[in-house]
Amino acid sequence: IHGLVPTARVEYKLRSTRNDRIAGNDFIYRAISRSFSNPQKRHKHFKAFLACQDPRIDVPSRRDFPNWKVRPLLKWINWRCPQAWMLARQIAVDEMTMRFKGVHQDKRRITYKKEGDGFQADALCDDGYCYQVYMRNDPAPKKYLNWKLSPLHARTMALFDSLKDEHHHVGMDNLYNSVLFCKAAFLHSKRVLCHGV
C-alpha cells in the first residue's frame, strides 16, 4: 500500500482517516488497532528487529565480496534480465550510477554529472533496457585481468559473457576505448565488435 500511495512515513498509514485525512488508511488502522494497543510502537519494534540476513552465515571478506548483502539480488537480476529481453545487434556499454546520499566507503564522488554521488556499475544495455550489470566495487574477473586488460575492460568483457549471439556491435564512450580492448573483445567467444565516439 505504501508503494501505491506513498507518504512521508509509513507510520502515518496506521492512523484513521478521521485523524489524518491525507495519509491515514482505515483498512490498515482497523486491522492493526484490533491486534495492538499501540500500533506505531509495534511498527518501530518490527523495523528494529526484522533481519534479512541469516546471522549464522559468516561475513565474507570485503575485498572478495564487497556487495555480499545484496549479492543474491544482483545475481538474480543478471540471471533474469537476459531471459526477459532479446538483444538487438546494436547494443551499448556505459557506466550506471545509483544515487546514494548516505555515507559508505564504496560510494563514488561524482562531480562531472548532475546525477550526484552514488554506487556505480558497468551496464550492458539495449534501447534503454539494462541487460546486465557489473558493480564497480566488485573485484574484476581474474580471467580477463590475465589478458593484461584494465579492471574496467575486464568487467566489460565479463558483461560480454552474458551475450547469447555472436557479432554484436557495441557502442561505448571514450572511457572504454583502447586498441587492446577492442582486439580482446573480437577475440572473445562472442566476437564482439566495439566502436566509440
Image: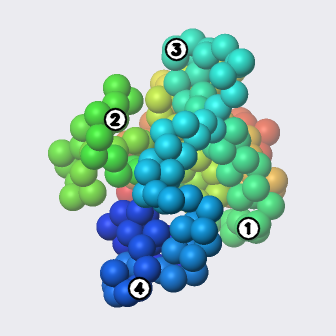
Q: Position of residue 59 (x, y in %)?
A: 61, 16
Q: CA distance from mark 1 to mark 2?
A: 30 Å
Q: Residue at x 49, y 53 (%)?
A: 43
Q: Amino acid at mark 3?
A: Arg
Q: Pointer 1: what residue?
A: 85
Q: Which-is-in-front pick, marks 3 and 4?
A: 4
Checking the image for residue 107, the label placed there is: 2
Decide if residue 49 is on the left or right side of residue 132: left
Looking at the image, which is closer to me, 159 or 97? 97
Looking at the image, which is closer to me, 111 or 163? 111
Quick one: quadrant of the N terminus?
bottom right
Above or below 167: residue 141: above
Of the residues under marks 3 and 4, which one precedes in the sequence?
4
Residue ranking furthest to the left? 111
Of the residues under marks 3 and 2, which one precedes in the sequence?
3
Checking the image for residue 63, the label placed there is: 3
Q: Position of residue 168 (x, y in %)?
A: 68, 57
Q: Pointer 4: what residue?
A: 17
Q: CA distance from mark 3 to mark 4?
A: 50 Å
Q: Position of residue 164 (x, y in %)?
A: 81, 53
Is label 1 in a helix, a strand or a loop? loop
Q: Amino acid at mark 2?
A: Lys
Q: Which-is-in-front pick, marks 1 and 4?
A: 4
Q: Residue at x 37, y 79 (%)?
A: 23
Q: CA distance from mark 2 to mark 4?
A: 40 Å
Q: Amino acid at mark 1?
A: Trp
Of the residues under marks 1 and 2, which one precedes in the sequence?
1
Checking the image for residue 76, the label placed there is: none
**Labelled pair 3, 4 in contact (Cβ < 8 Å):** no
